[in-house]
Image (cartoon, rainbow, N blue to C red):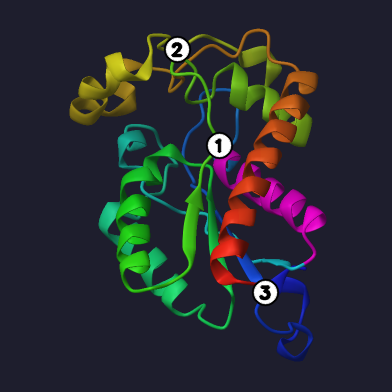
Amino acid sequence: MNLADVAWPELGERRLLAVPLGATEQHGPHLPYTVDTEIAVELCRRLAEARPEVVVAPPLPYGSSGEHAGFPGTLSIGQEVTELLVVELVRSADAFAGVLLVCAHGGNAVPLRRAVAKLRYEGRNVRAWCPDGPADDTHAGRLETSVMLALRPEAVRVNRFEAGATRPLPELIGRLRDEGVRGVSPNGVLGDPAGATAEAGRATLRRWADGLLEAAAAVAKDGIM
């Protein structure tokens, strides 16, 4: 069930709300700006297929993407606004048994963590879940490129594959904070898309969907649905 497709009398009561959180930011010379949002939406779709009590909210396509400001087209609302937006959104969702925030953008991690801590302190049943990945392949590399080949292959510019910064994220994080992504990777890639395949992307989506199901079960248990 999607909120975009129903009217309020059709909603029922005490359902679990899944909210896809993404971003609008550069993803190298070969992927579209909407990668994170598309991944979050697809994972929520799979969750709703597996758990009929789940309602999927329209996605939030903007987040904290200031680290990508060196690339044209990136749109960011910053950490403070992202945190406030999530807090107010979840506060407004008290009609639901619980809220699961499905975030596919790593830049949202800090404000999302703060928002969830505040909301849980207030007694609300909310959790955040983010897909995982290798430390040396965190942005527009083989992992995300494979997933997009599985989701929307026509959006992948396979003739533009090129490696970016391939050192593990913990080794880059200091410069990333000081200089942004462009300071450590002129093409905007953290990883290397070479070798990406749709088959690998489908396997990754299945693995992520299984992890999301576990998170949904924990929210459902907390909400005594």
Mark identifier at residue 17: none
- Identify the mark nearer the N-term, 2 or 3: 3
Asked if residue 42 is among those painted magenta in the image, a careful observer would answer yes
Q: Which residue is mark 3?
A: 15
Q: Three-letter amino acid code at disc 3?
A: Arg
The picture places residue 149, in percent across and down from the top left corner, at 74, 27
Would you call the spot at circle 3 few (<14 residues within 10 Å), some (14-19), or many (20 or more)?
some
Q: Residue at x 69, y 23 (%)?
A: 146
Instruction: Compare marks 1 and 3 and give the one earlier in the sequence.
Output: 3
* The residue positioned farthest toward the left in the image shown: 178
- Tell me which numbered mark, 2 or 1, is placed earlier along the sequence: 1
| Residue corresponding to mark 1 | 131
Nearer the camera: disc 2 or disc 3: 3
> Mark 2 or mark 1: which is in front?
1
Q: Are marks 1 and 3 in contact (CB under 8 Å)?
A: no
As helix, strand or loop, the secondary structure at mark 3 comes to loop
Image coords of residue 200 (percent x, y): 74, 19
- If the image is split into quadrants, where does the N terminus sit? bottom right
Apparent side of residue 83 relative to residue 48 in the rendered image (left or right) = left
Task: Determine which quarter of the picture holds residue 3.
Answer: bottom right
Q: Is residue 33 visible?
A: yes
Q: Main secondary structure of the magenta part?
A: helix
Q: Quadrant of the C terminus?
A: bottom right
Residue at label 2?
Answer: 164
Q: Amino acid at mark 2?
A: Gly
Which residue is at a point 59% across and 77% down the rendered structure image?
A: 96
Magenta span covers which residues? 35-52
